[in-house]
Amino acid sequence: MLLIFDCDGVLVDSELLACQVDAEFLTELGFPYTLDDILREFVGKSLADAIRQIEGDHGRPLPPDFSARANEILFARFETDLQPITSVRDAILSLPHPRCVASSSTPDRIALSLRITGLDDLFQSVFSAVEVKRGKPAPDLFLHAAARMNAHPQECIVIEDSPAGVTGARAAGMRVIGFTGGGHCREGHADRLRDAGALDIIEHMRDLESAVGRVSRL
């Protein structure tokens, strides 16, 4: 059994920080979004897909240095404010299965997040959406991770916090545990994950071991 973890909102409590930065910076650039807009539209999606949607919605391009400037602001915020999801390290170490990360974020953001939170020693491999043609909700990233880890999709359990991620993992033929313990999760989030195909839902990482046991038997 291979465990595939999303990063943002599953390992590190970064989504609310990232969405706040995106909403503030985009609005400053004349692309007005509220925090709720960002949470609803872009959580779980790759930066490239988000940029395409923003430019399509507004009918004009973002500045060419948008990604670099947004990351500079966000990474500075991470250095001071980013925290791991409560109990996630102990939860991961309680499970004997091989594990990896499959995230929509860029490799440098994933590496920074795991370093700051002290989780970078827990994973055999880390995979980013930049390595595949299509990001979540397409199945490409999950299939790529499974292939690189020499696991069949049917042998994989994915831990995801976003409907886009759940959709992609299910499209890849994998079982999914939905996680609702991140600071960005609002009322009804568990229902959205179930609707996307999550087979089990947990709010606390202390429940991960039992959830993996349940889902592995399905």
Image (tube, rainbow, N blue to C red):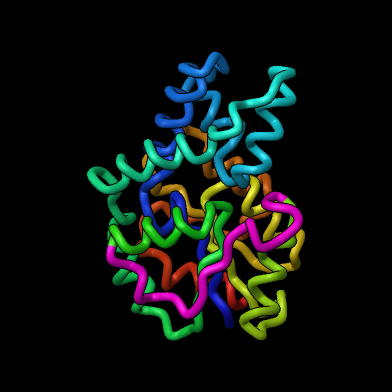
Whether residue 205 sits left or right of residue 177 in the image: it is left
Q: What residue lies at 39% left-to-right and 48% top-to-bottom?
A: 181
| Residue 81, x across and y down, in percent | 25, 43
Front residue of this view, candidates 145 and 77: 77
In this rendering, the answer to whether 10 lies above or below 210 is above
Residue 133 in the magenta stretch? The answer is yes
The residue at the far front in this view is 64
| Residue 105, x across and y down, in percent | 53, 52
The number of discs equals 0
Q: Assign the N terminus to one quadrant of the image.
A: bottom right
Front residue of this view, candidates 205 and 20: 20
Whether residue 202 sits left or right of residue 167 in the image: it is left
The residue at the far left in this view is 80
Whether residue 210 sits left or right of residue 147 in the image: it is left
Front residue of this view, candidates 180 and 44: 44
| Residue 9, x across and y down, in percent | 44, 50
Magenta-colored segment: predominant secondary structure: loop
Q: What residue lies at 30% left-to-right and 40% top-to-bottom?
A: 77
Front residue of this view, candidates 141 and 69: 69
Identify the image quadrant of residue 163.
top right
| Residue 51, x across and y down, in percent | 64, 34
Residue 218 in the magenta stretch? The answer is no
Residue 168 can be seen, yes or no: yes
Q: Assign the C terminus to one quadrant of the image.
A: bottom right
Identify the image quadrant of residue 117.
bottom left
In this rendering, the answer to whether 125 lies above or below 186 is below
Residue 218 can be seen, yes or no: no
- Looking at the rendering, the stretch of residues picked out in magenta corresponds to 118-137
Q: What residue lies at 48% left-to-right and 67% top-to-bottom?
A: 211
Q: What residue lies at 62% left-to-right and 60% top-to-bottom?
A: 199
